Image (tube, rainbow, N blue to C red):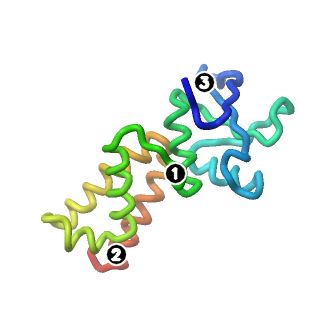
Amino acid sequence: MKTKYNWTRVQSDINGNPRYVVSWLDFGVNSYDAALNLARSIGGRKFHNKQYGGGIVFQSYSLPETEAAIDRVVGGATMKYTDQQDLVDEIAWQSLLEQPRVIYTEWLDCNVEGLINLFDYLNDKLNRRISNEMADEYNEEFMKKLKAEALL
């Protein structure tokens, strides 16, 4: 399997789940702490081991999905989509998150509940499988935006 980052397989966790370590430098930020903060938002943890200094460990059954999550949290500029529908979904999700009023008034023929359902569907599809915490944070942000724009 070809991956974007140089992963090192390490011992599975106590439940037998596979774990992989990646260098903090792959996050494209200026410090280990900054990379660690980004990684934590998608389930990464500091790798406490002398064999790999500056490592971040992830439990992962799919390295391409983990890499997509990393790309998303570092800004998405390097994201590559293998499926055109994934790209369309990501664009729709970003648009809903950034401009819900415009999407609601100019693009959708539904009530606000339909707008929320669409956001929930895309948020679950794109984010929930990576991190429930991250998906919940985006959901809260979206609901605050709806209230601020007087759609709720």
Q: Earlier in the sequence, mark 3 or mark 1?
A: 3
Packing grade of label 2 (10 A; few <14, some 14-19, many >=20) is few
| Residue placed most toward the observer, 64 or 133 | 64
What quarter of the picture does the C terminus occupy?
bottom left
Q: Quadrant of residue 10?
A: top right
Q: Which residue is mark 3?
A: 18
- Residue pointed to by mark 2: 147
Numbered disc in front, either 3 or 1: 1
Marks 3,2: beta carbons within 8 A:
no
**Residue 152 can be seen in this image:** no
* Rendered image: mark on residue 72: 1
Q: CA distance from mark 3 to mark 2?
A: 41 Å
CA gap, disc 3 and disc 1: 22 Å
Between circles 2 and 1, the one closer to the viewer is 1
Residue 136 visible in rendering: yes
- Which residue is drawn at the image coordinates 73% and 47% (left, top)? 25
Label 1: which secondary element: helix
